[in-house]
Image (cartoon, rainbow, N blue to C red):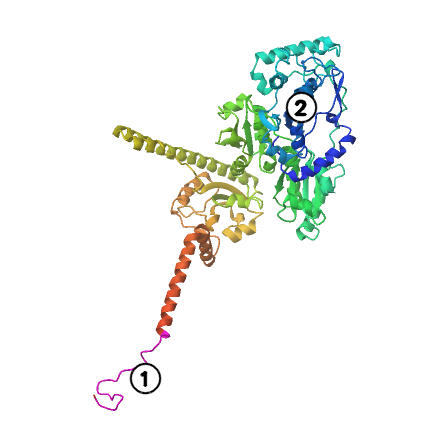
Amino acid sequence: MRLLNLSLFFGAAALAVAASSKDSDDDSARENTYFNQKKVAPLPEVTPDTWEKDSKASKWLLLKLYSPWCVHCQDYAPTFQTLYEFYTTSSPGGTAAESDANFTSFYDFRFASVNCPVYYEFCSKMGVTSYPTTILYKDGEPVQTLRGVKNMTVLSKLVEETLEQTKPGTRPKTLELPLAGANSSPGALEAGLAKPSKSEQAASKEKNTAAKTDPSADALGTTNAKPAATASRTPKKAPKPVATPNLKGISVPLTAETFQSNVTMTQEPWFIKFYAPWCHHCQAMAPNWEQLAKEMKGKLNIGEVNCDAESRLCKDVRLRGYPSILFFKGGERVEYDGLRGLGDFVQYAEKAIDISSGVPDVDADSFKALEEKEEVIFVYFYDHATTSEDFMALERLPLSLIGHAKLVKTKDPALYSRFKITTWPRLLASREGRPTYYTPLTPGEMRNTRQVLNWMKSTWLPIVPEVTASNAREIMDGKIVVLGILNREDQESFASARREMKSAANEWMDKQVQLFQLERQELRDAKQLRIEEAEDRGDQRGLRVAKSIRINMDKSDRKQVTFAWVDGVFWQRWIRTTYGIDVKDGERVIINDEDNRRYWDQTITGNYIVPSRTSILETINKVTASPPKIKPKLTISSFEKIFFDIRVTFTEHPYLTMGCILGLGLGLASWFRGRLRRTRGHFRLDDSSNKAPLLGGINSNGKVD
């Protein structure tokens, strides 16, 4: 499990957890235990406030950093707990503890743990990126880090090397280790402190032998045997049964305190609205939200937060407006951005229940059944060498896919073969059986949740999705869209039209893949020719330059062609006013370029484009040519198009536009200034008092020239 998000909530919740730990009935981890019939205090818990004191309390500190909800941490807990009990009750000689022995003070060695979801920032500063992580500290400084689940042999080897370094010659040459979860050590039999069964002794020897002969088992912890029934600890209380969510079928009002205790400090899924009583949109949505709570009775917790009363909580959640609707599971969250009708809420909630349960493991048969229900499936391929860090990164993804696609994982060789997987882990999107691969393969890129989600968002639409109010922008913006205007009421015609559009879409995509591969091969051939030419001339500098050429196949500057369809009856008014088409006259296809407010509805021959593979494919090539070979129509008036083009130009080329405007302004200012000089100078040529006398005129003294 990766580090959680809402750290501000966890810091305050930690105090409440600590205060209530004494009264908790099921908190067995904080109770005293017994090992070799000696009472052992609970494993110390380190907090940010006590870290400075705890790190200096002893020379050596073996620290376990974990999450109580992490499955790997739960598997690791008995091993580390038994290691702690075994050593703290042992004598400096390594045998069973005597009544006056003190292992901790003799070796100056202690054990402790940190609950990372509670102290998120603290664990981040310690460099924890996955759970569980075990760090050995010397005088408060880390000297060795173990990531993942480790067995007793690996941990004991680390401890023994440290103890021998502290007190040379005090450690035994051989050491019989207890089973994970045992309440006595094998050496306790000779001291008369415990009498383990023969099966426990045999299992312990077999485990230690297997660990020594199979070093690869250390990394995965596969040599940890299940504790024998006779070696169990003092009986633990039965775990609490899982509570049924939303028993009353109501939207629960939440405060800052109940939000922490019921939502962020648990792993129960919650669908919560954040609202303000004066908000008109919130008031309009209220009846649908109340009905949703009734529909989700016994299925999903529904809650609400009044942001006027809980302003601090809403500020910490960082809302963008009212109402805001978020789905929570523990510290993870995702914002709902769909429509606010009851049907939309129910559909999202049902998918959220399914996805929030985790990433299911599938085989070839179950995957085939899933393909019949889901249009888009993300498949994560893994093998025996996939690490816990990889799985933790994977578990962070499902919430963001609610309402969009399904995420599964598999290690079935049949699926390896079907999708030609040769490296692990690997991720792909299967859209109606057509794979789209996530190309980055390095461990860091596979665990980069943000990068993976960005790729998922670019591929989570079906090959031919339906355009709705919630996904219209995602489908239409930045692309050339082949949009089928279909009549859902005519089932036979509707099915045939969708089939033709899917066929055209698949053929177009195959063609684009071939063109891409051909273009890449041409660039490779050109690079190879330069290399060969430089080698023939013996030009070492030219050879280095040729080898350093990188083949850039970035498609970001190319306009993507996608396919979609819209219900022409439901969206009749919009289609008629925008494209001048009425589906009652027959199903049609348009090719829309939303960025330039233009579209094409006719083929090169002047006929209307219809839902036919031939009609669509022969027109796309003419439309995507530069310039287009078919004249487009506008979705706005010619007058509006002028201002639209000006705005687009300013947006795409702001510096050039500003330069043109500045140059135009300077030109106008220069012209205006020159005009002022001509009309408002120090003297005027047409002023009669300043004119020189003409020939034959009389000068100022009355004489004739």
Mark 1–mark 2 Cα distance, whole angstroms, equals 112 Å
The reply to whether discs 1 and 2 touch (Cβ–Cβ < 8 Å) is no
The quarter of the picture where the N terminus appears is top right
Q: Which residue is under mark 2?
A: 110
Give, as a three-letter code, the residue at label 1: Ser
Residue 663 in the image: above or below residue 368: below
The quarter of the picture where the C terminus appears is bottom left
Q: Nearer the viewer, residue 377 or 179?
A: 179
Q: Nearer the viewer, residue 264 or 634?
A: 264
Q: Which residues are magenta?
A: 679-704
Mark 1 or 2, nearer chain start: 2
Is 89 positioned to the left or the right of 450 in the image? right
Which marked residue is nearer to the observer: mark 1 or mark 2? 2
Which structural element holds mark 1? helix
Q: Nearer the viewer, residue 153 or 289?
A: 153
Q: Quadrant of residue 400?
A: top right
Q: Nearer the viewer, residue 197 or 376?
A: 197
Is 493 positioned to the left or the right of 174 in the image? left
Which structural element holds mark 2? strand
Q: Quadrant of residue 65?
A: top right
Query: What residue do we see at 68% from left, 49% from top?
Result: 282
Give, as a three-letter code, the residue at label 2: Arg
Q: Position of residue 309 (x, y in %)?
A: 72, 48
Q: Main secondary structure of the magenta part?
A: loop
Q: Which residue is under mark 1?
A: 689
- Please say whether residue 368 is visible from this viewpoint: no
Residue 514 in the image: above or below residue 681: above
